[in-house]
Image (cartoon, rainbow, N blue to C red):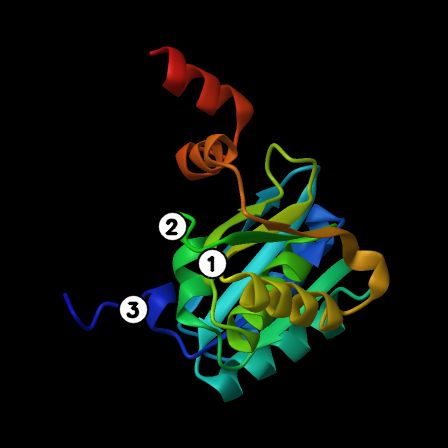
Amino acid sequence: PEDRVTLANQPALALLEFSSIAMGIRAGDAMVKRAPVEVVYAGTIHPGNYLILVGGDVACVEEAFAAGLDAGPDGLLDQLFLPAVHPDVVQALLGRRRRSSGEALGMVETRTVAATIGAADSGLKGAEVTLVEIRLADRIGGKGYCAFSGPLAEVEAAVEVAVDRLSSPEALVADVVIPQFHEEMLANIDAASEFWTRLRQSEA
């Protein structure tokens, strides 16, 4: 139904990332007790961390975000509040992957989930690029990355903005811009991110 409450139709998102599962659960409980957010998703991620993602109107999400910060400061790894999240970021979080387009590929790799999502949002808002993919935490050691494609100048701008707006320089693992991306690597990127998935697809 059109009026179904989903992550995709929320104007604001907030995410808290904890190194302690117990502290994360306590923070999540405090968040939903503080404000009536529309959606709440919480659970473990590699390598033993805990995420809480909430969505709803800006004021409620901001209140919930503040409650989570108050409840779990000692175990907090990273945080993110997006009062006007880009819709393509939400679609990527829900698993949508888009084919690379344009002459260049840019990637921002970070140490936390929150930093990756923030980088993706900033890059999309700062340049005319396509968000190819967001990969987060599980089976990549807790790290994350986002990939942009488009004209070289736009991809460079997206990566620059994404890196500049990270919460701290320590959040960044690497950023790259690859012009004239080779067709064979492009085929791998478009087919699958994970090595074993790609190998099995090709040999099936």
Q: Quadrant of the C terminus?
A: top left
**Residue 84 drawn above or below residue 204:** below
Work out whether residue 182 can be spotted. yes
Q: x, y percentage for residue 20? A: 75, 49
Residue type (three-letter) at the residue carrying disc 1: Leu
Q: Nearer the viewer, residue 15 or 173?
A: 173
**Residue 89 drawn above or below residue 12:** above
Q: Quadrant of the N terminus?
A: bottom left
Mark 3–mark 2 Cα distance, whole angstroms, equals: 24 Å
Q: Is residue 166 left or right of residue 10?
A: right
Residue type (three-letter) at the residue carrying disc 3: Val
Q: x, y percentage for residue 22? A: 71, 50
Looking at the image, which residue is at 44% across and 55% down? 102
Cβ–Cβ under 8 Å for marks 1 and 2 = yes
Mark 1–mark 3 Cα distance, whole angstroms, equals: 24 Å
Looking at the image, which residue is at 82% across and 67% down? 168
Disc 3: which residue: 5
Q: Nearer the viewer, residue 69 or 137?
A: 137
- Per the image, label 2 sits on a secondary structure element best described as loop
Cβ–Cβ under 8 Å for marks 1 and 3 = no
Q: x, y percentage for residue 71? A: 73, 69
Q: Which mark is residue 98?
A: 2
Q: Is residue 108 left or right of residue 70?
A: left
Specify which label sits upstream in the sequence, 3 or 2: 3
Q: Which mark is residue 94?
A: none
In this view, the mark in front (3 or 2): 2
Tally of numbered tags = 3
Looking at the image, which residue is at 33% across and 72% down? 9
Disc 1: which residue: 131
Specify which label sits upstream in the sequence, 1 or 3: 3
